[in-house]
Amino acid sequence: MNGVHDMGGMQDFGPVRPEKNPPVFHARWDGRITAIYSAIGAQGKWAIDFRRWTRELLPPAEYLSLNYYQRQYALIVELLTSSRMVTRAEIETGRRARNTEKAVPALSAANVGEWFARGNSKKREVAVAPAFKAGQRVRARNINPPTHTRLPRYARGKFGVIEGDHGVFVFPDTNAQGLGEKPQHLYSVRFMARELWGDQAKPKDTVVVALWDDYLESA
């Protein structure tokens, strides 16, 4: 979807000032939010693409006013309340409401290491023919879906070259909507910076974007 979250190439948001030697978490509650998000993710109830789409649906003003962990908290609240796993009153009071079922098993501390070690790869070992090959010139499709997509706006309609094929992966656009994984090839596509940003970009700079078959067409 086209939203404020897709900020690549957008102007007037101020300079990026990276920290030197930043801590893992700036506040203790940042770590708590990370733990909660991991715990609910371990249940496998929501696909990662659906979670991303849910976060993208935050109102633009709210999205921009929140930091990373505040957005994660807003996402957690939306996921849990929309699925009726908890009520907003329970979240606000910290007390369990009467006559509510909590059928989801808790992620115990003893299982955390195993869960992270197992991972959740989206690569699929299925026989799917690639639509493109390394060295081929392609064009990123100019699409504007109302739902989740991993094709950034700055690349749409632009020409690039296939640099490599990563194999077959879950297609995020359909996976986010519960329409199936639609596994297909994922490529590294190299774009000249001037193709993306115009003459203001340096002539030798390039940008590599990971793009699926359905995002591309032959050029």
Image (spheres, helix red, strand yellow):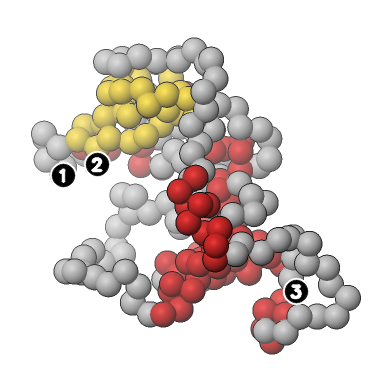
Residue assigned mark 3: 87
- Give the crowd class for mark 2: few <14, some 14-19, many >=20 residues within 10 Å: few
Judged from the image, the secondary structure of the residue bearing numbered disc 1 is loop
Q: CA distance from mark 1 to mark 3?
A: 51 Å
- Looking at the picture, how far across and down is residue 110, in whole percent? 55, 62
Judged from the image, the secondary structure of the residue bearing numbered disc 3 is loop
Quadrant placement of the C terminus = top left
Mark 2 or mark 3, whichever is nearer to me? 3
Marks 2 and 3 in Cβ contact (< 8 Å): no
Q: Pick whichever, 115 or 211, lies toward us.
A: 115
Q: CA distance from mark 1 to mark 2?
A: 7 Å
Q: Residue at x 59, y 54 (%)?
A: 42
- Looking at the picture, how far across and down is residue 208, in whole percent? 27, 35
Q: Earlier in the sequence, mark 2 or mark 3?
A: 3
Task: Indicate the amino acid at tag 2.
Answer: Trp
- Residue extending furthest toward the bottom: 93
Q: Residue at x 45, y 15 (%)?
A: 130
- Residue extending furthest toward the right: 99
Q: Earlier in the sequence, mark 1 or mark 3?
A: 3
Q: Pick whichever, 111 or 152, lies toward us.
A: 111
- Looking at the picture, how far across and down is residue 139, in whole percent? 37, 24
Q: Is residue 218 above or below residue 120?
A: above
Residue assigned mark 1: 200
Residue assigned mark 2: 197
